[in-house]
Image: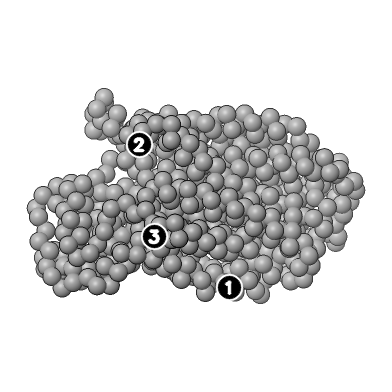
Amino acid sequence: MSANTGTSEAGALADREPSAKEIRLVVGASSAGTIFEWYDFFIYGTLAYILKDAFYDVDDPTLGLLLVWSTFAVGFAFRPIGAILFGFLGDRLGRKYTFLVTVTLMGIATAGVGLIPTVTYLEENYGASYVVIAPLIVIFLRILQGLALGGEYGGAAIYVAEHAPPDKRGFYTSFIQASVVGGFVLSIIVVLSTSALMDTESFEAWGWRIPFLLSIALLAISLWMRLMLSESPVFQAMKEAGETSANPFIESFTFPGNKSRIFIALFGVTGILTTIWYTAFFSSLSFLRGPMNMDPLTVNWVLLIAGTISMSFYIFVGKWSDTIGRKLPITVGAAITLLALFPAFWGLGALANPGLSDAAERSPVVVSGPGCVTDPFAELFDREQTDCGKVLETLTASGVRYTLNEGGELSLSAAGNDIAIADEWMESGTARSAGIREALSQYGFDFQPQQPPVANLLGIIAILLGLGALSALTYGSVAALLSEMFPPKIRYSSMSIPYHIGAGYLGGFLPLISGIIVASTGNVYSGLWYTWVVVAFGLVVAWFGLKGGPPTDFQDDAV
């Protein structure tokens, strides 16, 4: 293949197109490794409802889940550092060996999570002062995972892109995007399979460790496949010509026009794709399982079906972009998202638990008390919470929409009628949840696990497929796009830095930020505003910043 770089790097591109057998091995090994690595990362989020009790010594379910999402976000926060480190190594030492290191680091760190003692075990055997050990180890391992993931995507995407012929680059690299969804799907399959082999009590007690420990086997398979690969022909040619970068990190910010490219890649590409992706899959998972009280097993099956089908959307979009260009699918997907995001989740809520929404309309819930309006965040995160903060957590975890009023004494009402708050409700989250739910059930709120009828389940799957299609439009061609945006000698660093800053902060903190917004407003749909704002800004950047028309290789004058 060839490229028009406009610099001496033109000679750095390989002149031999790989055979069909070689490209199948390249795509297969890179995609399999990506599936396994994202499985390692996502299994934590898939099992969040168990990990909040295993690793965090908190009584309130909402606070526990927010702490889980906080630790989940820690891994994302370190992705940019991993991008800098492994991007530097990838541009200096090669693509192949760098992503061998990243997949090894991810596999070991994930298996380590399966060996962490629970807070219950630590307290019973060593005392209450030792329970902090569990979350500290989790944070350390999540940091290692974030570092590994920061180097993985760029390595796999560039490796495939630099093997692919220009007219099929979008198609071949789209398998990398589909593999990210594949990791999510695999995490659900493993959780379903493991939980099916034992009773619920055993799975929640110790069976949840198996999916983490399975990472060792997946690591062995991934290493075996990737060790069969040769180095990228583009990097080999650059190395032989002595045109590799001396300091790819510095050059990423000093190469002419690269700062604007990084800005566009960060907000106009990654900001859009990452918030839509996490909203489509993780937010829907948390929304259905949490506020909508849908049966957890049913939720897993619904996400499994929708995720498996939607993997094909990414490949279609990638292939389509080889003809129409990379800009059009991204801007169209972002624009439709702005119009369809809230209606899609309203539809999910109406189909998953229609009685909850109806009860909220007929019997509006109001919480009044000191600090309920003026300082809700302190109440949500202070370990010594006020009674108002405890009530808000219970309502949020139950999916009950509420209005906040400032007041002298704590009070709770539904349909204008006061609900007496018993003293024992404040002694534990279990007692409070049982008391408030029993009281609100008198006003039509149904807190039993929901098992929607088949017609509703089909509607939920259809909506999830629609969200998956929007994710595919904004993500399917991205590996090819980012590879084409940056010069080959600093490509690994230049694309990894904005990608992982965007995915790490804009996307990785999405569950946490959305959860805070929901908890502080009392509206289970209000967290979607975070996604909407990020996508709206990204659409403006993409519209004016991305180059339209058919795909082209990197050019010095192309932004």
Going from N to C along the chain, the mark reached first, 1 or 2, is 2
Could you say whether the residue bearing mark 3 is in a helix, strand or loop?
Answer: helix
**Which residue type does callout 1 highlight?**
Ala
Above-or-below relation of 220 to 542? above
**Which residue type does callout 2 highlight?**
Thr
Could you say whether the residue bearing mark 2 is in a helix, strand or loop?
Answer: helix
In the drawing, does residue 247 fall left or right of residue 288? right
Q: Which of marks 1 and 3 is in front?
A: 3
Return the mark for residue 17.
Answer: none
Q: Residue at x 59, y 62 (%)?
A: 469
Q: Mark 3 points at which residue?
A: 352
In the drawing, does residue 256 fall left or right of residue 362? right
Q: Residue at x 15, y 73 (%)?
A: 416
Q: Name the residue under label 2.
A: 200
Quadrant of the image for the C terminus? bottom right
Discs 1, 3 touching: Cβ within 8 Å: no
Return the mark for residue 335.
Answer: 1
Coordinates of residue 282 in the picture (x, y in percent)? 47, 54
Distance from Cα at disc 2 to Cα at disc 3: 23 Å
Q: Could you say which is closer to the camera, residue 258 or residue 60?
A: 60
Coordinates of residue 463 in the picture (x, y in percent)? 50, 63
Discs 1, 2 touching: Cβ within 8 Å: no
